[in-house]
Image (cartoon, rainbow, N blue to C red):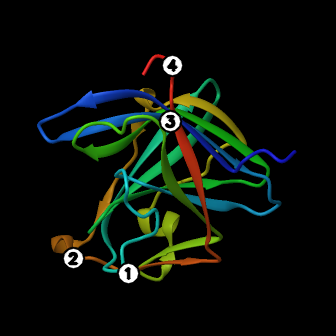
Amino acid sequence: MNEPLVEAEAIAFERERPPLGTLRLDVRLRNPEVEPRWFLLPEKLGASPLPPPGGIFGGEPVRVVGGTNAAVVVTFRGAHGFRALALPPVAKVRLRGLPLRTVGSPPGGSFTIDVALVTSLLVDGVQAPAWLGSDLRTDRVVDAKFADARRLPSRYTPDYLPVPVSVDQVHLTSAVVQPASSF
């Protein structure tokens, strides 16, 4: 049986200034392909994982280290934010505690998040790593806690004016997020 490309479990909920909150997810991503793939995830519950039509005005990468391996997660800012990870071929990445913003109470029971897999991610016409000026490589096997993430240099557009984002060969998938037994 094939393993799913995306699996997720809700492990915690943190209340913030009402009505906001943050769900913490244990997310497992798998790229079985022989080519690298970008995995795009929503930043907010119920949002699309795809870049907003109006573009983005900034990117905030973090390196999440687990042992000797690391993943780089970029949060792109725009009309709605999204997160992106570039997975190498035949990769398995587990991120524990990945934040997902919410409005209101956490969902009761299971819920679904959409994830987009794309072959390229261009920001203002250039590859995302070149636009950010950062090495966004993720190791083939990573098991890391998002709480241990370290910021990398961010980039914002002048005056926070949005620039276009384009993706190629989009494959949409979804994951049913189950609450952990301790949730």
Instruction: State left or right for residue 164 relative to residue 157.
Output: right
| Kind of residue at badge 4 | Ser
- Counting residues from the start of the chain, the first of labels 4 and 3 encountered is 3
Q: Position of residue 143 (x, y in %)?
A: 62, 30
**SS for callout 1:** loop
Circles 4 and 1: CB distance less than 8 Å?
A: no
What number is the disc on residue 161?
A: 2
Q: How crowded is mark 1: few (under 14 residues within 10 Å), some or many (20 or more)?
A: some
Most foreground residue, 147 or 150: 147
Question: Badge 1 is on which residue?
Answer: 164
| Kind of residue at badge 2 | Leu
What number is the disc on residue 129?
A: none
- Counting residues from the start of the chain, the first of labels 3 and 1 encountered is 3
Circles 2 and 3: CB distance less than 8 Å?
A: no
Task: Identify the residue at image location x=36%, y=73%.
Answer: 52
| Kind of residue at badge 3 | Val
Q: Distance between the residues labelled 2 and 3?
A: 29 Å
Task: Identify the residue at image location x=28%, y=28%.
Answer: 14
Question: Badge 3 is on which residue?
Answer: 64
Most foreground residue, 162 or 114: 114
Name which quarter of the figure residue 83 lies in.
bottom left
Task: Identify the residue at image location x=47%, y=83%.
Answer: 125
| Kind of residue at badge 1 | Pro
- Counting residues from the start of the chain, the first of labels 2 and 3 encountered is 3
Question: Badge 4 is on which residue?
Answer: 181
